[in-house]
């Protein structure tokens, strides 16, 4: 296991499977299992080699703590959302900031990168899920979450659907890129804190401490 410090640094790293589970706001691993990213109070992001625990680089630019982070499946892109109300997309290999998306209402509470790395989805404090083009930073889609989006979102393995946990205790599923809401999943008794696709099924966790698994077409 590992503990994440205020600067996003990781201490007491144990290079074993599964990956270290940092006790902090922002962390994410690439689907290829090779890299891991953590965020800190001071707005920095750190990229790590998941096998050796070696720090690869630091991303700097955020002016406040990093709420959320995501890594593309191929390890090429890193996305981060901060209390400074910006969403930033970075080149993992160099640490270069590729895009900065700023808006007064853009408190990023969840982040997900599509399997092909083409788009980034951000669940925001204004209660919407906004999808941005990873290459150009343009907004492609804006969908309304039920009572506000909580800290959880995920793309389906084929990238054609996006699921987001909401404060109204539902998980909502939209088509991508059309934005049509195709499912509203109920059953939890508190806001949703985690969403993960397991093939065609969704695994969800909630502040009610009751994990659930179901197909995205169930209600």
Image: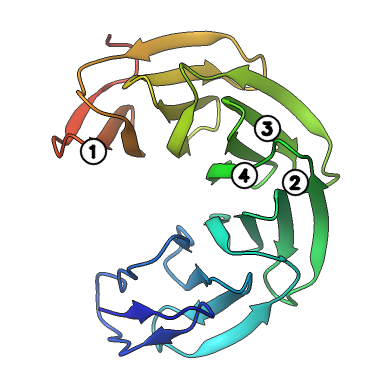
* Residue contact between numbered discs 1 and 3, judged by CB atoms under 8 Å: no
- Residue at coordinates 56% horizontally, 25% vertically from top-left? 127
**Nearest the eye: 82 or 137:** 82
Q: Nearer the viewer, residue 49 or 143?
A: 143
**Mark closer to the chain start, 4 or 3:** 4
* Element type where label 4 sits in the image: loop
Q: Name the residue under label 1.
A: 207
Q: Residue at x 20, y 23 (%)?
A: 189
| Position of residue 170 measured from the top left corner of the image (x, y, whole percent) | 34, 19
Dot in front, 1 or 3: 1
Asked whether, in this view, residue 93 is left or right of residue 109, the answer is right
Q: Earlier in the sequence, mark 2 or mark 4?
A: 4
Residue 197 makes an appearance in the image? no
| Residue at point 68%, 32% (across, down) | 131
Q: Judge the density around disc 1: few (<14), some (14-19), many (≥20) Cα neighbours within 10 Å.
A: some
3D distance between C-alphas at marks 2 and 3: 9 Å
> Quick check: 123 left or right of 26?
right
Which residue in the protein does label 2 denote?
134
Position above or below: 119 against 77? above
Gap between marks 1 and 2 measured at Cα = 31 Å
Q: Residue 131 carries which label?
A: 3
Q: Mark 4 touching mark 3, by CB under 8 A?
A: no
């Amino acid at each position: 296991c590992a503990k994440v410090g205020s600067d996003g640094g990781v201490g007491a790293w144990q290079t074993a499977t599964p990956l270290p589970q940092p006790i902090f706001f922002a962390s994410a691993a690439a689907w290829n299992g090779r890299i891991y990213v953590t965020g800190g109070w001071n707005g920095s992001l750190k990229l790590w080699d998941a096998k050796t625990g070696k720090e690869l680089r630091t991303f700097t630019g955020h002016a406040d703590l990093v709420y959320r982070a995501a890594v593309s499946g191929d390890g090429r892109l890193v996305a981060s959302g901060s209390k400074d109300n910006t969403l930033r997309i970075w080149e993992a290999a160099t640490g270069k900031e590729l895009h900065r998306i700023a808006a007064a209402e853009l408190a990023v509470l969840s982040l997900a990168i599509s399997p092909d790395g083409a788009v980034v989805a951000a669940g925001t404090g204004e209660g919407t899920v906004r999808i941005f083009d990873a290459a150009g930073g343009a907004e492609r889609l804006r969908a309304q979450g039920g009572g506000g989006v909580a800290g959880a979102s995920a793309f389906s393995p084929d990238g054609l659907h996006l699921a987001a946990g909401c404060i109204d205790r539902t998980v909502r599923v939209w088509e991508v890129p059309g934005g049509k809401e195709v499912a509203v999943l109920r059953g939890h008794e508190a806001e949703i804190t985690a969403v993960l696709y397991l093939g065609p099924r969704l695994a969800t966790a909630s502040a009610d401490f009751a994990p659930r698994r179901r197909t995205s077409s169930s209600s």
